[in-house]
């Protein structure tokens, strides 16, 4: 009797992927202990992990359920604010909420709980928005969710909500990534965890999304993406499943927003613009719509290019006595746009297409046998 | 046990000024293969769509195993432009079930133009159709706590693919299959929802005579093996005459004949509808 992959999938590629990911985490941890904490590498890794989570959550909607939503920045904003509001230490509230007499919230919750709150708040709003909006299709849905994100941004800056959101002033002093470092009694850092912990948070969330995609619900989502009419005829309740995908995606966007708050150390509603959603959409498209690995990979690539590797293009560079022409403030963005165009031209379906990390090993092992 | 599986009563479906199905009444009994035939544009697929909940009928009611699955009467703007019969016969509580609900009750269908899940393998196409009989929710499913259920669903899928002779292509992408096999896969996917009534919308479309012959044997086979009642729309007369217990013929939305295959073959109204009438 011949064995089929659907009967017994070879576990080797999955195991290899797991090893690669574990080694990567280990490398991050070790690098963090030995390299200076101010290195640009860690900035990129922290922001990259944050964006990876948000990009994967967006991919769950756009790539796996076929719902074209552009509300990601709005849900990140809700997550970021929820996290900040519940974690600013009580003794700092007077100075943070200086125009609102210390604000209306007079308790704090531990960071992990606040992260879950951030997700739940975003998911709750997604549920409410989803009720009317998910009846729309493709472009119309995109515009409606984009509009929602803009409205949320305006509402959070509304002065009347000041005691909670601090109006248009920024929220700060809440625990950030650096507070994850373990310090001894005299305040010196003994174990650096400010990059490792965000990696673990993002890793756990992405793992949950991957598990969801590989469950029966994930298959139902893909069925809706491939053919709504057929999916419905096979007994898949469209409204229920779309609502579910939208809320779950927003949950993780909310957690991502909270991570972004920690990364930035401050939160201000006006920074969660639609440009942020486009950045994430760009990451998803470059990585491959329908590939979790692609989204993660291109997040780091995107952040590294925009924050680090191309920085030199913004400054005057001398080669010997020759001053390189064109290099001035803003030139980085020109090159960056060019690179994106080239990537899109040569990888029409993104860097990974719909492949995942284990698929890479699978192809290699097959070739090895031949 | 209720012998009557499907009963359509005075079904009328009007789109704007066009009456696609006009006062159609028919019934299907347990274990029968019933065909609905008629020239192009006669309203066959529209009738199917009313049964499966895709359309809300303008007037009439549909009962499945004695349970109302659709009931409505002309309302709103339609009340003024309604061109069918019995406008007041079904006034009162209207019933409208969504397609997924109808499928859950036990009516599965295939499509005239194949609608497989293109991004999935053959195996996953069938497995996905098992989702509606799940007992797990999204949390237990995500955390893979429904291991036993998942294993059972995979086993059943394998059985089903074996029954339709598609097990050897289980890992291929659904859309990479040849046309005839895609049709079989669509039937297998419909069977995965565990239906009592199977609706086949032109299953032989685009098949050559030999494939058509195999298909009629196949339809008989699955009817017995899965204890189905089958309601089929088809243009291939050989297939229809071969497998049907009874046939309904519609033209311009109206029922023009019904009976066993021999009666239909010699019915002048049917011949006229198919060959063109003399009054034009």
Image (cartoon, coloured by chain):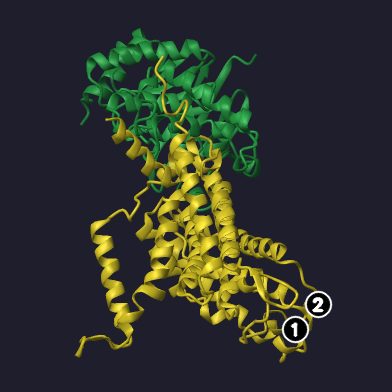
- Which percent across, then down, holds residue A18? 50, 45
Residue B185, above or below A19:
above
Decide: few, some or many residues near mark 1? Use Cα within 10 Å; few <14, some 14-19, many ≥20: many
Mark drawn on residue A93: 1
Q: Which chain is yellow?
A: A
Q: Quadrant of residue B242?
A: top left
- Which percent across, then down, holds residue A59? 46, 55
Residue B223, above or below B86:
above
For the residue pair A187 and A195, the one nearer the viewer reads as A187
* Residue beneath disc 2: A106
On-image quarter of the C terminus of chain A: top left
Residue A351, above or below A85:
above
Decide: few, some or many residues near mark 2? Use Cα within 10 Å; few <14, some 14-19, many ≥20: few
Res. B22 in view: no
- Which percent across, then down, holds residue B72? 56, 40
Res. B203 in view: yes
Q: Secondary structure at mark 1?
A: helix
Is A177 on the left-hand or right-hand side of B10? Answer: right
Q: Secondary structure at mark 2?
A: loop
- Which percent across, then down, holds residue B194? 54, 24
Q: Are discs 1 and 2 both within one chain?
A: yes
Q: Disc 2 sits on a residue from what chain?
A: A
Residue at image coords 65%, 33%: B135
Q: Disc 1 sits on a residue from what chain?
A: A
Q: Which chain is green?
A: B
Residue at image coords 31%, 73%: A336
Marks 1/2 in contact by CB < 8 Å: the verdict is yes
């Amino acid at each position: 009797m011949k064995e089929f992959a659907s009967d017994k999938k070879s576990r080797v590629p999955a195991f290899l992927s797991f090893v690669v990911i574990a080694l990567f985490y280990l490398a991050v941890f070790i690098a963090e202990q030995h390299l200076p904490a101010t290195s640009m590498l860690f900035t990129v890794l922290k922001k990259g992990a944050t964006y990876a989570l948000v990009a994967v959550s967006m991919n769950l909607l756009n790539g796996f359920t076929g719902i074209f939503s552009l509300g990601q920045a709005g849900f990140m904003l809700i997550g970021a604010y929820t996290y900040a509001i519940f974690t600013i230490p009580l003794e700092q509230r007077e100075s943070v909420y200086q125009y609102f007499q210390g604000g209306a919230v007079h308790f704090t919750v531990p960071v992990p709980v606040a992260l879950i709150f951030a997700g739940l708040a975003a998911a709750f709003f997604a549920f409410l928005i989803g009720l009317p909006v998910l009846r729309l299709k493709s472009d119309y849905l995109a515009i409606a969710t984009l509009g929602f994100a803009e409205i949320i941004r305006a509402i959070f800056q509304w002065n009347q909500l000041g005691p909670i959101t601090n109006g248009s002033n920024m929220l700060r002093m809440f625990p950030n990534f650096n507070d994850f470092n373990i310090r001894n009694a005299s305040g010196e850092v003994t174990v650096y965890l400010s990059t490792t912990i965000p990696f673990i948070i993002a890793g756990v969330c992405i793992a949950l999304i991957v598990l969801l995609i590989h469950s029966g619900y994930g298959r139902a989502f893909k069925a809706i993406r491939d053919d709504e009419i057929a999916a419905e005829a096979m007994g898949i309740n469209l409204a229920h499943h779309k609502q579910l995908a939208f809320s779950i995606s927003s949950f993780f966007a909310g957690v991502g927003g909270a991570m972004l708050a920690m990364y930035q150390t401050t939160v201000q509603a006006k920074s969660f613009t639609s440009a942020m959603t486009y950045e994430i959409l760009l990451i998803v498209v470059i990585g491959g719509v329908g590939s979790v690995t692609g989204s993660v990979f291109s997040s780091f690539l995107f952040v590294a290019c925009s924050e680090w590797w191309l920085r030199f293009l913004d400054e005057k560079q001398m080669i010997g006595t020759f001053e390189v022409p064109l290099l001035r403030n803003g030139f980085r963005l020109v090159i960056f746009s060019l690179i994106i165009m080239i990537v899109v031209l040569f990888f029409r379906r993104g860097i990974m297409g719909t492949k995942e990390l284990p698929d890479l090993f699978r192809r290699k092992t097959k070739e090895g046998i031949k | 046990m209720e012998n009557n599986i499907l009963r359509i009563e005075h079904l009328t479906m009007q789109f704007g000024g066009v009456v696609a199905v006009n006062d159609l009444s028919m019934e299907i009994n347990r274990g029968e293969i019933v065909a609905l035939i008629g020239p192009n544009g006669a309203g066959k697929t529209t009738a199917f769509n009313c049964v499966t909940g895709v359309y809300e009928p303008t007037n009439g009611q549909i009962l499945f195993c004695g349970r109302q699955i659709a009931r409505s009467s002309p309302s709103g703007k339609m009340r003024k432009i309604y061109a069918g019969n019995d406008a007041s016969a079904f006034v009162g509580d209207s019933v409208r079930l969504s397609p997924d609900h109808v499928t859950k009750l036990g009516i599965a269908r295939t499509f005239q133009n194949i609608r497989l899940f293109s991004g999935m393998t053959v195996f996953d196409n069938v497995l996905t159709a098992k989702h509606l009989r799940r007992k797990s929710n999204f949390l237990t499913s995500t955390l893979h706590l429904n291991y036993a259920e998942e294993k059972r669903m995979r086993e059943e899928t394998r059985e089903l693919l074996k029954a339709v002779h598609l097990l050897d292509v289980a890992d291929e992408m659904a859309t990479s299959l040849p046309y005839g096999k895609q049709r079989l896969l669509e039937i297998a996917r419909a069977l995965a929802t565990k239906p009592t009534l199977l609706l086949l919308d032109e299953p032989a479309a685009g098949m050559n005579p030999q494939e058509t012959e195999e298909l009629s044997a196949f339809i008989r086979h699955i009817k017995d093996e899965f204890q189905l009642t089958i309601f089929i729309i088809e243009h291939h007369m050989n297939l229809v005459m071969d497998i049907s217990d009874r046939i309904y013929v519609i033209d311009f939305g109206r029922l023009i004949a019904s009976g066993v295959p021999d009666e239909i073959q010699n019915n002048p109204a049917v011949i006229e509808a198919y060959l063109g009438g003399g009054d034009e």
